[in-house]
Image (tube, rainbow, N blue to C red):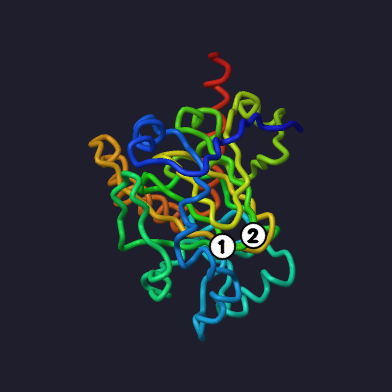
Amino acid sequence: MGTIKTKPIKRIKEISKADFIKYYYKPQIPVLIEGLTTDWPAYKKWNIEYIQSLAGDQVVPLYNNEPTKGKQKSAEPTTEMKLYDYLELIKSKPTDLRIFFYDLMKNMPILANDFSYPDIGLKFFKRLPVMFFGSKGSTVLPHYDMDLADLVHFHFHGNKRVVLFPPSQTKYLYKVPYAVHNVEDIDLDNPDFNKYPALKHLEGMEIEMKHGDALFMPSGYWHYITYLNGGFSMTLRAFSKKPQVLMRMLYNVFFMRHFENKMRKWKGQKWIDYKDKKAIKKTNKCVHKQ
């Protein structure tokens, strides 16, 4: 066992639109901005109790830390629960259950009155602000977003640890074919360098987010997230105008995702095992060449 090499993500208090574009957006470098939400109503209002007060009888799908197996889809919920009851759960005790990609405009549009889209040079896709909820004990599998958007991730109520890996590190991450995640047996908190030697070469960037923090995650960056206690986040996304990124996004969304789920349905666990073996062989071969 060992430790993955990381360096801190830069934390700044405020930034102008011109400087954000020049120093972070154009070179595609992550940064955490502290003051971006302080003038939002959400900064004072958003906590677990406030979301509970709006939850009503909504029932939400929940995900856990277990790898998907057999004929499960690549992102399949474990169970479901009333949103109010789930939020009560994460207030009271650790659980690995979490809410993934909660469509704010569809499920709780009143929250849109509590925030604004930051004027930092990104053209945000305003139809899809999404939220994520978790508790101490929840982790998010290392992955990058299928739509390859530039992301600004805002955290509320509690703390979470975020580790990012630039696209250049994909060769060390044991990326699984036809997916946007790595081999699910890998534990980046306790990496097995004997079994996965490429992880010794992996270099990431790390930050602990607190209430109101905003983290810029550039297109294609891998993220590995650990909830340190109960809390939730919102992500705003801006799609790239680069033709090569657009083509990869269309491939991911309209071909790869559907192909993957069809193969899982057809071959089940054999397909997952085949891909894992292929990912390990390809990644280790890449390291041996160095």
How far across and down, in percent of the image, does residue 168 sit?
46, 28
In the figure, 209 relative to 126: above or below?
above
Residue 228 or 193: which is nearer the viewer?
A: 228
Q: Is residue 121 left or right of residue 9?
A: left
Instruction: Please tell me which residue is depicted at 26% across the width and 34% down the height of the picture.
Output: 244
Quadrant of res 2 = top right
Question: Reading the chain from its start, which is encountered first: label 1 or label 2?
Answer: 2
Few, some or many C-alpha atoms within 10 Å of disc 2 (few <14, some 14-19, many ≥20)? many
Provide the secondary structure element on which disc 1 rests: strand
Residue 125 or 250: which is nearer the viewer?
A: 125
Which quadrant: the C terminus?
top right
What amino acid type should be assigned to the residue bearing mark 2? Gly
How far across and down, in percent of the image, does residue 77 sit?
53, 66
How far across and down, in percent of the image, does residue 213 sit?
54, 52
Task: Name the residue that disc number 2 marks.
Answer: 158
Q: Is residue 290 left or right of residue 94?
A: left
What amino acid type should be assigned to the residue bearing mark 1? Phe
In the figure, 54 relative to 5: above or below?
below
Quadrant of res 48 = bottom right
Q: Which mark is residue 30?
A: none
Count of residue discs: 2
Instruction: Please tell me which residue is depicted at 70% across the width and 29% down the height of the picture.
Output: 193
Q: Which mark is residue 232?
A: 1
Instruction: Please tell me which residue is depicted at 56% across the width and 68% down the height of the picture.
Output: 62
Residue 131 or 11: which is nearer the viewer?
A: 11
Instruction: Please tell me which residue is depicted at 63% across the width and 47% down the height of the picture.
Output: 161
